[in-house]
Image (tube, helix red, strand yellow):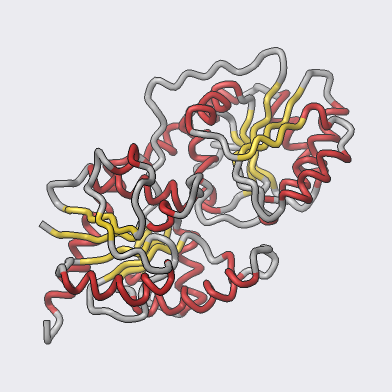
Amino acid sequence: MIRVAIDVRVLTHDAYPSGVGQYIIGLLKALASVRERITAVPVADTRGFYPDHLNHLWPLTIVPPFLSLPWQQTALPAWLAKFQLDAFLGPAFVLPWWGKTPSAVTIHDLTPFHPECAMNEATRRYLKTMIPSAIRRAHKVVTVSPDIAAEVVSRFNIRPTKVTVIPPVIELPDDISRKPDCHQRLILSLASVEPRKNLVRLIQAFDQFATQVDVPVKLVLAGRLGADTRRVEDAIVQARHKADIVLAGYVPETEKLALLNRASVVVSTSLYEGFLMPVVEAMQAGVPVLSHRVGILKNAPPGSYYCLQDTASIQEIVSGLKLAVTCYEGQMKMTHVARQWASQFKTRPVGDLLATMFEEIVSSARDRPGR
């Protein structure tokens, strides 16, 4: 039985799970589905977080609670060696600088290398240093979509065989039933409030759209408040239809499912993405999607969503909203195609991909001379 340590510190420091946090939770569930092949050891530097997500899957291992980054670079490699773990996964862009334990690292996207994607400059500098180092040290580089795999291979000039595409787990309850609001068309955005999510343009486009249609419409922005919160709030204040725009912030899972049940369309105006989990969730729920062709949607089949050609154009977004909200022709076929395609991101298939990758990593490391 292969024992794999997984760094889950992102969860310990995050009151509301971000996209990476949700990815790690799904990762643990996927590994739980292949217990006969892999024993996962979640490693953290604090206690008392998300017990509902972890206690029924794996016992949590606590290492001495040093400061987060020094702990990762000093205590973690020593701990891995002491307990002779077979492999280690860094699920959030980084790996320790040293250590002999065979490792994999997940690269969700390359936002720090895109100047047009605004982010905290200290975080950008840190990740621009740590990501290349992690890619060099890793036995395998995991990406969440073929698009990011190609970008990683091209930017860092590495062998394509070193990169493995393993998508996140996305699995909505089987009994989810849609009841769209017939009295007010609900347009739903499930995105953190960051500049690259392009929410200011979405608000401006919605304001124009609401003026041009003769049905009541409402825009709900559900996602963690982030670096673009002030600009988004200002855009709402300036909107003519501000009473029909809700900045909900982070919503728990049950509330998110309720919003998906009522939504007429889920819209994403993001400029750059690694995967785009909320859109795939919407597809699994049978909700029509309006989005730019980014992340995993580059691999979605034709006719599975309404495609925005240019999310820098407010008029393009307005036209997309009109088509998605007021035109029902072919929509049932579209959601059927989308739901079938989105079903591939379930727990067990992802678990099998992870188990196979770790088996290859461990086998390769054992075959190396000197081990």
When the figure is inspected, residue 205 is found, relative to residue 155, above or below; the finding is above
When the figure is inspected, residue 97 is found, relative to residue 87, above or below; the finding is below
Q: Residue at x 78, y 47 (%)?
A: 201
Determine the image quadrant of residue 66.
bottom left
The x, y position of residue 9, in whole percent, is 39, 58
Q: Quadrant of the C terminus?
A: bottom left
The answer to whether 361 appears left or right of 105 in the picture is left
Q: Residue at x 22, y 60 (%)?
A: 4
Q: Nearer the viewer, residue 322 or 250?
A: 250
The answer to whether 312 appears left or right of 248 in the picture is right
The x, y position of residue 314, in whole percent, is 81, 45
Q: Nearer the viewer, residue 362 or 258?
A: 258
Q: How many numbered callouts?
A: 0
When the figure is inspected, residue 167 is found, relative to residue 151, above or below; the finding is above
Determine the image quadrant of residue 240.
top right
Residue 306 in view of the camera: no
The x, y position of residue 139, in whole percent, is 29, 73
